[in-house]
Amino acid sequence: MRAALFIRFARSWGLACVACLVVAVSAHAGTVTPLFGPTEATRTLTARTLARQIQQDGPRKAVQDLTRDKEWPRMRRAVATGWQNWIDLMPDLMSATDPATTRSLQLALRQALPRNPRAVVAALDPRNGPVRGGRTICAPAGMPATWRHRAIRAVEALHDIHLIDQGADCLNALNGKTGS
């Protein structure tokens, strides 16, 4: 009899403790830091919010924040997949990245070329510079032959008068032609 009474008391007491804990946590939810990191880490990075940050704070600050929040892998995946809004951010971001990050973003743009040639070619440097120029981004070195063939077809199918120079630079690189 005593054991049954003790179990009933322990259950009701346990439920009461859990209820108090839930109320306390929800009352202070705005001030409690999640166990896995600061509140900023729970925010979802989007191309729109990143573009707004670049416009407001400048590319250097955005690059620092991406590094601090360890968002570069997500950024590279989005670019390599060919997502237009992420590729559009490359000219601004790549102007402020360190050499290793620049190389990883160049590779992501290279991977995106057959998937979204218009966006990638639009992100190329019209002066064919060493960071975002067609001879750098479109160079097939290290890429499979199938990538090269798909990239050539994709860039050749691109018909945009505003992208003629960047498209020509890219095709020259894809075809192994050197030049400026």
Image (cartoon, helix red, strand yellow):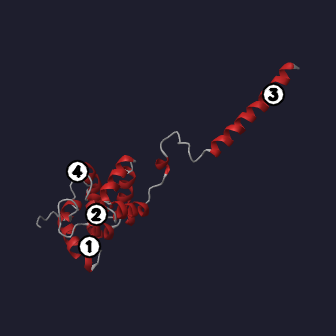
Image coordinates of residue 119 in percent, x first then y, are 33, 68
Q: Amino acid at mark 2?
A: Pro
Sequence-first disc among 1 and 4: 4
Return the residue at label 3: 9
Residue situated in front as seen by the camera: 50 or 101: 50
- Which type of secondary structure does the marked residue at label 4 adopt? helix
> Residue 99: which disc?
4
> Separation of disc 1 and disc 4 at Cα?
30 Å
User: Which corner quadrant holds the C terminus?
Assistant: bottom left
Image coordinates of residue 2 in percent, x first then y, are 86, 19
Q: Amino acid at mark 1?
A: Glu
Return the residue at label 2: 91
Other residues around mark 4 within 10 Å, as few (<14) / some (14–19) / many (≥20): few
Other residues around mark 1 within 10 Å, as few (<14) / some (14–19) / many (≥20): some
Quick check: 105 left or right of 70? left
Quick check: 135 left or right of 29? left
Q: Residue furthest top?
A: 2
Quick check: 87 left or right of 5? left
Return the residue at label 1: 156
Sequence-first disc among 4 and 2: 2
Sequence-first disc among 3 and 1: 3
Residue at the (37%, 63%) spot, across then down: 56
Which mark is in front, 2 or 3?
A: 3
Q: Determine which quarter of the picture holds residue 80.
A: bottom left
Q: Amino acid at mark 3?
A: Phe
